[in-house]
Image (cartoon, helix red, strand yellow):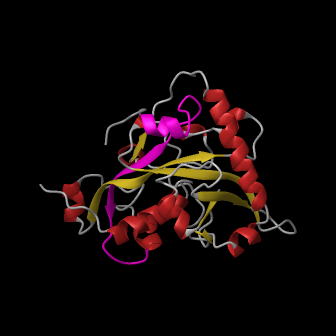
Amino acid sequence: MRVQSAPRKLLLRVVALALVLAAGFGPDGVSQSTAHEAEHMRMTALRPLQPGDQQRADAIVAAARATMAQYADYRKALAAGFEIYLPGIPQPVYHFTRPIDLRETPDRFDPSRPTSLLYVRQAAPAPRFRIVGVMYTARFGVSEEELNRRVPLSFTRWHLHTNLCLPRSGPAEDGLVRDPRFGLQGSISTPEACQAAGGVFAPQQYLWMVHVYASETDPARIWVSGDADERGMQHGAMKPGQPM
């Protein structure tokens, strides 16, 4: 069976949802972890520490913190054109992203210019959002060596969403969050099943992603990924380097 490429409009909807569902939570704030997660995720393998890795990691954290300081007040981020993805859905972490950054930053890695700023909600009287980190991205198709060149794989793991069945129409959050067949945690993971459900199959999302929680002081929490990341995809059962 020939798999057609998912229309760009649908892929952009998945990117938007990926920024939200990377937290592994649904529209009611309840964890949406399922047995299907491993079918929809590929992660890079951790590597042994190499000369220069510590210095590169430190430089990334320093650049991330400098950027975060500019937008410690979330209202400055909004004024600068950052948008909150699906703000109506309760999430452990909210992605603030400018469309231009989503278009440009995957191609040119600059640790001072992440794809997204990461915030958590706070109860009043504190400011509504507190910045906790950043997210970097890279295009699907780049080598693992390139991912390691950007962010040392001795410190963290990049992830890529795979084998996605997307609804052809309707609000993204309705089709991909509420319908258990579709999306990042859906039961469908093959082109045949997706076609039978009337969806559009995407073998992979087109962005690799990695979070850096630079507000933390413990390196283990700055670079946390996989199952240990309470704000992440919770895909601890994922085999490192799992093929798509």
| Residue 43: x %, y % from top left | 44, 39
42 or 71, nearer to the observer: 71
Q: In this view, does 104 lie to the left or right of 193?
A: right
Res. 80 image quadrant: bottom right
Is residue 29 something that shows in the picture? yes
Q: Which residue lies furthest to the right in this view?
A: 125
Residue depicted at 53% across the width and 32% down the height: 153
| Residue 137: x %, y % from top left | 51, 51
Image quarter of the C terminus: top left
- Position of residue 148 relative to residue 139, above or below, is above
Q: Give the range drawn in magenta.
A: 145-171
Q: Which residue lies furthest to the left in this view?
A: 1
- Position of residue 136 relative to residue 145, above or below, is below
20 or 145, nearer to the observer: 145
Q: In this view, does 121 lie to the left or right of 91?
A: right
111 or 43, nearer to the observer: 111
Res. 81 image quadrant: bottom right
| Residue 113: x %, y % from top left | 62, 55
Magenta stretch: residue 166 in it? Answer: yes
Q: Which residue lies furthest to the bottom in this view?
A: 170
- Position of residue 172 relative to residue 3, above or below, is below
Image quarter of the N terminus: bottom left
